Amino acid sequence: MIEFSVSLASTGTVRLAGYEQMLRFGYTKNRGIYALRVEADGEWQGMTLRAFWHLPDGNAAPSTLVADGLVEVPALITAVPGEGRITFEGTDGTRTLTSADVCYCV
């Protein structure tokens, strides 16, 4: 499994490892091999996290739960070429936080 590191900051921004501005998932035939290691800081700590996937054509794909700080990239995401985005949402039952978009490219 190829893991990409993603950090959620209290300000709502999302930081990628290194100097990357976008996640790059390779070619459309690369399915089921990517995962995101999600690090939650500040306000995000202790929340149940979910990743909301948005396909390059603007349509939403099913969301996925972040379990133990890891979320696998769904096969549907890497099956569609182009640039899409991911939004993270966290909740503790009383509050909800939403992140800025993270762009990805297939």
Image (cartoon, rainbow, N blue to C red):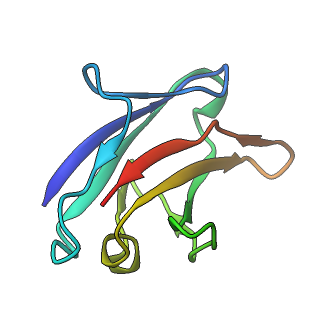
Image point (25%, 21%), residue name: 18
Image point (37%, 38%), residue name: 22
**The one of 81 and 97 positioned closer to us in this rendering:** 81
**The one of 87 and 89 positioned closer to us in this rendering:** 87
Q: Measured from the top left, where is residue 42 in percent x and y?
A: 60, 21
Image point (56%, 70%), residue name: 57
In this view, 10 is above or below 6: above
Image point (87%, 46%), residue name: 94
In this view, 99 is above or below 87: above
Q: Measured from the top left, where is residue 33 in percent x and y?
A: 17, 67
Q: How many marks?
A: 0
Query: Where is residue 25, by image quadrant?
Result: bottom left
Q: Measured from the top left, where is residue 105 in percent x and y?
A: 34, 53
Is 79 situated left or right of 43 in this image? left
Q: Quadrant of the C terminus?
A: bottom left
Q: Measured from the top left, where is residue 24 in percent x and y?
A: 26, 48
Is 10 situated left or right of 73 in this image? right
In this view, 60 is above or below 40: below
Q: Quadrant of the N terminus?
A: bottom left
Q: Residue furthest left?
A: 1
